[in-house]
Every structure is written in structure tokens, then in C-alpha cells.
Image (cartoon, rainbow, N blue to C red):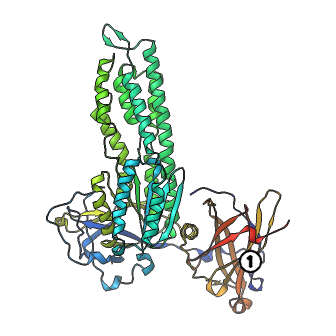
């Protein structure tokens, strides 16, 4: 999703029926709108036995929920359709995907008082498939694609309603928008398969530097390996510099992938229902230079503490994307997205048997030795997989890090969609940005159950949710229009810089807006959110306009029979655009979102 800051919103005028919008100098009293927000926090929980089979027929009385360490009452409860029957236990346990381990809890059936929760729209199930071509080798991508294809073979019995396909190359691209047509999903994946993956280059660069370490010769003194101010020191410095350059490049590539994914996940906040994102890659190396640095230290250990070398080593270890992965998980939790990373390469050996043989042969070189030890390999494998495990564990998903786990992994994704429990509890006093810790347990510890669920969430204000809803309408077509908002474009004019200024009119029935009676006026407060996307996928930041509303009491009954109108101007580049507008009634806490297509060629007029 490309950033695009070319949207400029110009406030021109504000006209409501009977000229009733805040037209005198008396300020609107904010005390009319002081409220304490109380929201219901919804946590989806997957409860399985040690073999991975769902534990069914649980009730709210089976659970204990702790919010920031304090027990809270379960106010809402829902059991997925697959959580009501008896669990089928296979004779032999199958190989399981690697779970974010934390033993825990189970889940329940639906008592009558909870049957209306969550709303039907929130029970929708949406699947996102992301193929990371930037971090996949051809052979591993082939294995992943084969597993996905077999997963889609059972599409007729799939629990999800819509599928979206993404590809990550130099950018994050939507290859197939939301669809329920499995053939369209296959075609999109076939198209991705024709693009050359770039994960092999990363491995080649790593092996090149490892070869430099292995072939380096050390100067000798009578006491064995040491350093003098000769070519040995220069070799050590040159190799360390190569490791630092490699670490910086891989850090930037991996970090950009995580940030793009976090931005996309954020856009899904307004998409109703549960969302699962399957992320296919060769792993995201949290600290890409750490293993090579370990190999370098094994070779050049006697010079490791020299000031320049220590500084270089510190720089290499600073390239760490773990904080970015944590922020990605927080964004996923805030927007009800469960992450399922799959990797054919994260848990496999980094170097081949032939390269291990070369490493042994390097022992015949002065100062040679096993630079890529079992310990070094463990560091590399851990760094490749730890980020994926964190993504899964923090959001309640699963991570499959070996090819043999793929089939079982996708079956577990399907199972999660069908067999789950949603627990709701009331959370008063929302504080924007505050991070909360969630812990869920089963009262019956004898069940020996494993629980997966999102471990934390951050407070979002109602205004933030309205902004996210607008972005979701733009990115995912998730429109909702309870306020009967309509958007109308006028003819635009081109300015000297080549931009098109397009007047936009918003209309909405005033009787849909909550207006608070006062001594002289009925007052309300509206906010407008605007975002655009061009034909290349460039998306503007969501912009906001405030609309205080005041209608004189003696005009109120007449006014509410009419439409409110607001006019602003978009200043955009020529070409086709999509324009999403959100209208949030702050007092009634109701948001309408509408997405419209705009072609400047059709609306533009001569200067």
C-alpha cells in the first residue's frame, strides 16, 4: 500500500438546512458532550487438547478472564458452530504446527442471554493470503503454493465468506480483492507464481560473507593465532564491514515488510467479523547479522575487543526488527486479525552439507576453523523463526515453520474458524493508546487444555474507530451507512500546478443526527473523515474536518425534516480515484462510510 500525501482538503463552506450550523458567535458547550466510553472487549479463544483437537461444549462458567491482572465478569459469550458437538480424537496424534506455548483454557456453548451477541455482521469470517516474494526462495514458494492449493480444494466446505490475496515484492499489492470465488483466488496465486521471488539473493549474500570468513588467513606468532597490524587486521575489518552492510540491508527489507503489513492490518479495523491472515515467507530474521557476527567472532576472537571492532559489532546487533513485529501484533490485536505465519525455510539449516564440508576444510588454512558451528546455526534458525512465532503467539494464531506442518497448519486454520469461543467483558474508561494485558484460564485445570487468544490490546477512541472505518471502506469496500450519507461531485478545475480542484457535497438527513436540546439551541457534533486512493494504489492519510451543529429551538422541527449539507474541495492529481468519506455523529456514536469513484477527466473543467 503506497503512501500518497497528494490529497488536500480545502474547507469552503458549511450549509445546513435553514442555515442552522453554528452561525452565531456563542461557542458550543463541550460539557453537553462529556461522556465516559464503556466498550465491550471481544476476545476470540481457541481451546484444544494436547493433540490439537478442539474442546467443545464449554460455557461462560468454565472461564476466568483477567484484565491487567484483575478478574472481570464475562458479559457476552458466543460459541462458534463447531464448538457445540463432541470432540473427535484421532488414534494417533498428527504433527502439529509450532504453537505459541502457554497452556491454558477452554470454551463454551451459548446461553440464551448471550444469543444476540455478537451481531450477525461480526460473525463473518475473512481470510487473507499474503505471499512474501521478497523473502521466499523459488523452491520454498513452490512448497507453500502446493499446500495452499490443496487447502483451496476444500473450498466448498470452507467456513470463510471472503478471501483476499496479497503479494509483497517491492510493495504490498492487492492481487485479488475480496472474493468468494475460489477460482479467482487460484488465478491470483498463479499470477504471483510467475513473478521471480527474491529470497535466494539473501541466502547468496549470507553465504558469500561466510565464505570470506572461512577463507581469511591469520598471521601467526610463536604463541599461535594472534593479530599484528598486517593484512589479517584488514581482513577482519573488511569482513566486519560486509556483515554490517548485509545486516543493514536485510534489516531495512524486513522492517519495510513488517511496517507495510502493519499498515494493511490497520486498514482492516473497519472490516466486520473475524479476520485471519496467512503469511508465507522464508522467515523474518529478527537480528539478521547476529549469526554472521558469531561466525566472525569465532574466527577473529583475539581482536574482538579492539575499539573499532566493538563499535562495529554493536552496530550490527542494533539492527533488530523485534519491536516492529511487536507493534504489528498490537495492530493485529486492535483490529481483530489473527496471524498465521507459514515458512518452509525458517526452521531449516542455513547452509548445505557441501558448505559444511568447506567449513571443515578451512581448518587447513592458517587460523581456519568451524566458523559456522551448531551454535551459530541455532542463532540463525532462532532469529528466522522467533519473529514468526511472536506474530502467532501474540495474536492467538499458529506458526508452521517446517514443510511437513503445512497440511496440518491449514487444517488448523479451518478448525479455528469453526471451533472458537468469543468472550466479551465491559471495559470502562478508555484511554487512547493505553496497552492492556489479557489473560484467560479455565477453571478446571484438570482439562490440560491449550488456549490461544490475543494477549493484549490498545485502547482506541471512538474517533479512531470512525477513522479506521473510513479507511476500511476505501481499502476493503466495508461500507456502512446508517446516517444515509450521500456524496456528490461537481465539475473540477485545473490549477497552475496540474492539480484538479473538485468540489464535493455531502448530504445527510438531519433527523438521523442526535441533537441535544439547550436553552436556545439544539446542538450536536459531527466529524468528517476523507481518504482517497489513486489507480496505482497510492493512498492518502485520513483527514478530518470538525462540524459543530447548532439549530435554533424555534427552527428545530422544520430543520429536522430537511437535509444537512456540507461542501469541501478535494485537490488531487488527474486520473481515476476512489474517495471514501466517513461521517461520525459524536453524540450518537454512529458512523456512516461511503466510497465513491471519481474520474477527474469526467469532472474537470477548463481553467
Left or right? Give the position of 503 relative to 82. Answer: right
Question: Label 1: few (<14), some or many (≥20) within 10 Å?
Answer: many
Q: Nearer the viewer, residue 327 or 553?
A: 327
| Residue 585 image position (x, y, % from top left) | 60, 77
Question: For the N terminus, which image quadrant?
Answer: bottom right
| Residue 491 image position (x, y, % from top left) | 78, 73
Left or right? Give the position of 249 relative to 217. Answer: right
| Residue 579 image position (x, y, % from top left) | 65, 69
Q: Which residue is most to the right?
A: 607
Residue of label 1: 22
Is residue 321 shown to the viewer in this render?
yes
On screen, residue 23 above or below 286: below
Provide the secondary structure element on which disc 1 rests.
Answer: loop
Left or right? Give the position of 498 relative to 546. Answer: right
On screen, residue 278 above or below 207: below
Left or right? Give the position of 511 relative to 379. Answer: right
Q: Residue at x 45, y 27 (%)?
A: 240
Q: Which residue is most to the top?
A: 222
Q: Nearer the viewer, residue 115 or 242?
A: 242
On screen, residue 290 above or below 544: above
On screen, residue 258 above or below 490: above
Question: For the C terminus, which image quadrant?
Answer: bottom right
| Residue 331 image position (x, y, % from top left) | 47, 59
Amino acid at each position: 500500500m503506497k503512501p500518497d500525501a497528494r490529497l488536500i482538503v480545502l474547507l469552503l463552506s458549511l450549509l445546513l438546512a435553514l442555515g442552522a450550523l453554528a452561525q452565531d458567535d456563542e461557542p458550543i458547550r463541550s460539557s453537553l458532550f462529556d461522556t465516559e466510553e464503556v466498550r465491550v472487549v471481544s476476545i476470540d479463544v481457541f481451546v484444544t487438547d494436547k493433540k490439537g483437537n478442539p474442546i467443545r461444549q464449554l460455557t461462560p462458567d468454565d472461564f476466568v478472564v483477567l484484565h491487567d491482572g484483575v478478574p472481570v465478569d464475562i458479559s457476552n459469550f458466543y460459541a462458534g458452530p463447531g464448538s457445540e458437538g463432541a470432540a473427535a480424537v484421532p488414534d494417533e496424534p498428527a504433527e502439529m504446527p509450532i504453537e505459541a506455548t502457554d497452556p491454558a483454557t477452554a470454551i463454551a456453548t451459548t446461553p440464551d442471554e448471550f444469543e444476540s451477541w455478537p451481531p450477525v455482521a461480526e460473525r463473518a469470517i475473512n481470510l487473507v493470503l499474503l505471499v512474501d516474494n521478497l523473502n521466499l526462495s523459488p523452491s520454498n514458494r513452490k512448497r507453500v503454493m502446493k499446500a495452499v492449493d490443496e487447502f483451496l480444494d476444500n473450498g466448498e466446505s470452507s467456513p470463510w465468506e471472503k478471501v483476499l490475496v496479497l503479494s509483497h515484492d517491492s510493495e504490498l499489492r492487492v492481487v485479488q480483492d475480496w472474493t468468494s470465488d475460489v477460482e479467482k483466488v487460484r488465478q491470483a496465486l498463479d499470477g504471483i507464481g510467475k513473478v521471480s521471488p527474491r529470497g535466494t539473493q539473501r541466502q547468496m549474500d549470507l553465504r558469500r560473507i561466510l565464505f570470506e570468513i572461512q577463507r581469511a588467513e591469520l598471521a601467526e606468532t610463536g604463541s599461535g593465532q594472534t593479530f599484528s597490524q598486517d593484512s589479517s587486521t584488514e581482513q577482519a575489518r573488511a569482513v566486519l564491514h560486509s556483515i554490517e552492510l548485509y545486516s543493514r540491508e536485510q534489516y531495512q527489507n524486513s522492517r519495510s515488510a513488517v511496517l507495510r503489513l502493519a499498515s494493511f492490518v490497520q486498514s482492516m479495523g473497519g472490516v466486520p467479523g473475524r479476520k485471519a491472515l496467512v503469511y508465507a515467507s522464508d522467515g523474518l530474521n529478527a537480528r539478521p547479522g547476529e549469526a554472521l557476527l558469531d561466525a566472525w567472532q569465532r574466527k577473529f576472537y583475539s581482536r574482538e575487543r579492539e575499539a573499532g571492532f566493538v563499535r562495529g559489532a554493536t552496530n550490527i546487533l542494533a539492527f533488530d526488527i523485534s519491536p516492529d513485529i511487536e507493534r504489528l501484533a498490537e495492530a493485529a490485536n486492535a483490529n481483530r486479525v489473527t496471524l498465521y505465519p507459514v515458512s518452509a525455510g525458517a526452521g531449516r539449516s542455513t547452509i548445505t552439507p557441501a558448505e559444511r564440508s568447506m567449513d571443515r576444510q578451512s581448518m587447513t588454512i592458517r587460523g581456519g576453523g568451524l566458523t559456522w558451528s551448531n551454535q551459530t546455526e541455532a542463532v540463525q534458525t532462532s532469529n528466522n523463526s522467533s519473529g514468526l512465532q511472536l506474530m502467532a503467539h501474540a495474536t492467538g494464531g499458529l506458526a508452521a515453520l517446517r514443510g511437513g506442518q503445512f497440511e496440518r497448519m491449514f487444517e488448523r486454520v479451518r478448525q479455528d474458524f469453526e471451533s472458537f469461543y468469543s468472550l466479551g467483558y465491559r471495559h470502562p474508561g478508555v484511554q487512547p493508546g493505553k496497552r492492556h494485558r489479557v489473560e484467560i484460564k479455565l477453571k478446571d485445570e484438570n482439562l490440560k487444555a491449550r488456549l490461544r487468544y490475543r494477549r493484549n490490546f490498545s485502547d482506541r477512541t471512538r474517533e479512531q474507530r470512525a477513522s479506521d472505518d473510513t479507511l476500511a471502506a476505501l481499502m476493503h469496500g466495508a461500507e456502512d451507512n446508517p446516517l444515509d450519507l450521500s456524496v456528490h461531485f461537481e465539475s473540477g478545475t485545473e490549477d497552475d500546478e496540474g492539480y484538479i480542484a473538485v468540489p464535493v457535497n455531502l448530504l445527510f438527513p438531519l433527523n438521523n443526527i442526535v441533537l441535544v436540546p439547550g436553552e436556545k439551541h439544539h446542538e450536536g457534533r459531527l466529524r468528517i473523515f476523507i481518504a482517497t486512493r489513486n489507480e496505482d494504489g497510492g493512498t492518502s492519510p485520513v483527514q478530518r474536518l470538525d462540524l459543530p451543529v447548532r439549530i435554533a429551538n424555534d427552527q428545530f422541527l422544520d430543520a429536522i425534516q430537511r437535509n444537512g449539507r456540507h461542501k469541501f474541495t478535494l485537490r488531487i492529481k488527474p486520473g481515476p480515484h476512489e474517495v471514501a468519506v466517513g461521517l461520525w455523529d459524536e453524540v450518537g456514536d454512529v458512523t456512516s462510510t461511503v466510497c465513491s469513484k471519481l474520474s477527474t477527466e469526467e469532472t474537470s473543467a477548463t481553467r
